[in-house]
Image: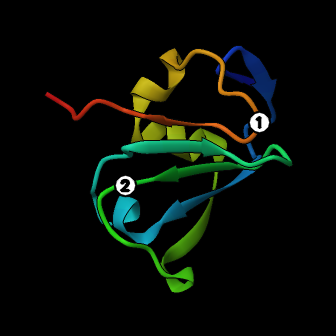
């Protein structure tokens, strides 16, 4: 189990990301659907369904360690991450 936004999740929990993040763009937008699904997107491109990819929540945190410091993200909400310095 790992902690994200004040909650615990299995490390293998499937999440949605975009191909841009997997190509090296930073995660800039974190969204949590009404049903609790997580999305970790670049936040800079207009996305098509074909841009979607599945990764584990632990992989998302490996790609963007700042996710570990997120505060609560309620269902149906999104958070914009500040650009990396």
Residue at 27 percent across and 56 percent down: it is 25
Give coordinates of residue 54: x percent, y percent: 63, 65
Looking at the image, residue 21 lies above or below residue 28: below
Q: Is residue 8 left or right of residue 80?
A: right
The residue that label 1 is drawn on is 75
Residue closest to the eye, 74 or 9: 74
Q: Are marks 2 and 1 in contact (CB under 8 Å)?
A: no
- Kind of element beneath mark 1: loop
Give coordinates of residue 51: x percent, y percent: 48, 78
The disc at residue 32 is none
Q: Tell me if I can see residue 79 in this picture.
A: yes
Q: Quadrant of residue 21?
A: bottom left
Looking at the image, residue 82 lies above or below residue 37: above
The disc at residue 42 is 2
Residue at 53 percent across and 20 percent down: it is 70
Give coordinates of residue 6: x percent, y percent: 70, 14
Q: Nearer the viewer, mark 2 or mark 1?
A: 1
Question: Local crowd at mark 1 within 10 Å, few (<14), some, or many (≥20)?
Answer: some
Q: Earlier in the sequence, mark 2 or mark 1?
A: 2
Residue at 49 percent across and 81 percent down: it is 48
Q: Seen from this angle, which residue lies furthest front?
A: 76
């Amino acid at each position: 189990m790992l902690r994200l936004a004040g909650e615990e999740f299995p490390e293998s929990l499937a999440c949605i990301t975009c191909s841009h993040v997997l190509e090296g763009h930073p995660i800039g937008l974190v969204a949590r659907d009404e049903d609790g699904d997580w999305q970790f997107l670049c936040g800079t491109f207009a996305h098509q369904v074909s841009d979607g990819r599945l990764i584990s929540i632990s992989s998302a945190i490996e790609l963007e360690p700042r996710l570990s410091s997120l505060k609560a993200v309620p269902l149906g909400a999104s958070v914009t991450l500040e650009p990396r310095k």
